[in-house]
Amino acid sequence: MRHLLSPLDFSVEELDSLLDLASDIEKNPDKYKHACDGKKLATLFYEPSTRTRLSFESAMLSLGGNVLGFADAGSSSAQKGESVSDTIRIISCYADICAMRHPKEGAPLVAASHSSIPVINAGDGGHQHPTQTLTDLMTIRSLKGRLDNLTIGLCGDLKFGRTVHSLINALVRYPNISFVLISPKELRLPDYIRQDVLEANNVPYKEVEELEDSMTNLDILYMTRVQRERFFNEDEYVRLKDRYILTPEKLEYAHKDMLILHPLPRVNEISVAVDNDPRAVYFKQVQYGVYVRMALILTLLNINI
Ligand code: NCD
């Protein structure tokens, strides 16, 4: 039995097959509409979510399966003090596969070690968010045609942004990737990624504080929200939250074919005036997220169509 806890749980070859399957689902959705008949997905969300949870539900429904779960820890037995390891033993009796989001780093790993069904990490604290990474990879591969030879700008909250951590882990495995890390000093990429992932893999990167300075060199600009819920101090959040706002004026310096991604939700970091720019692909990205989660469910359940 397999789980998805980190993007590294799949080899590059396995990721390629998963993305090929997601592209086939995009082209031929009818072929898959009964693939999960009789199967159940449980969504265990101990932290707020719109896209990820509904995207998983939409994916399972599009495969003919059913969904059950909770969207709020307050309405689950966690409120009564039940541990994640007990909860997953229970859920294993009710469902065939589950997606878990939790504020504590490592909670899905704990769940996986007590589970008899595949566990998908749908975001654990400020740590990892592998299914957002699958979404980002499918978006880049579909719209750029490649996952190698790219200069990627990551902008915003690189400290707490789990989507950034997972995306870096996944992309360093492709040839000729480099990163521009754009953040205020307070929200720099943690050492355990800068040193243990970027430097350990000899991946070129530079750290800058201004978004405008590096715009001209980027193939991808990945914007992120400042992660308010992970701050210890509200004043610090307020001081940093509007540090970067992408506007049409700033985009004048960017390549004509640079893609702008964002895992969403957006707060202020991309002006709505950018939404109609053909380079803005963050709403298309959401659609890719459903195809890729369909492919992931089929892969973890070992269903071949
Ligand atoms: C992201 C997350 O939850 O980490 N959202 C998502 O799943 N698309 C990004 C965020 O909340 O800023």
Image: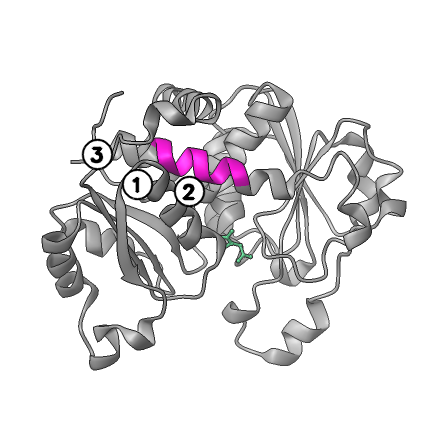
Marks 2 and 3, Cα distance to the nearest angstrom?
A: 16 Å
Residue indicated by mark 3:
301
Say if the magenta span includes residue 38: no
Q: Counting residues from the N terminus, which is met first, the one under dot 1 or under dot 3?
A: 1
Horizontally, residue 269 falls left or right of residue 13, namely right
Q: Counting residues from the N terminus, which is met first, the one under dot 2 or under dot 3?
A: 2
| Helix, strand or loop under label 3 | loop
Q: Nearer the viewer, residue 216 or 191?
A: 216
Residue indicated by mark 1:
4
Marks 1/3 in contact by CB < 8 Å: the verdict is no
> Mark 1, mark 3: which one is toward the viewer?
3
Amino acid type, callout 1:
Leu
Q: Position of residue 237 (x, y in %)?
A: 64, 72
Crowd tier of the residue under label 2, counting other residues whose Cα lies within 10 Å: few below 14, some 14–19, many 20 or above:
many
Q: Residue at coordinates 82% horizontally, 33% vertically from top-left?
A: 216
- Examine the rendering and report whether any part of residue 198 can be seen: no
Q: Is residue 232 above or below residue 244?
A: below
Marks 1 and 3, Cα distance to the nearest angstrom?
A: 12 Å
Amino acid type, callout 3:
Leu
Residue indicated by mark 2:
131
Q: Is residue 32 above or below residue 264?
A: above
> Mark 2, mark 3: which one is toward the viewer?
3
| Helix, strand or loop under label 2 | helix
Q: Which residues are magenta?
A: 287-295
Say if the magenta span includes residue 290: yes
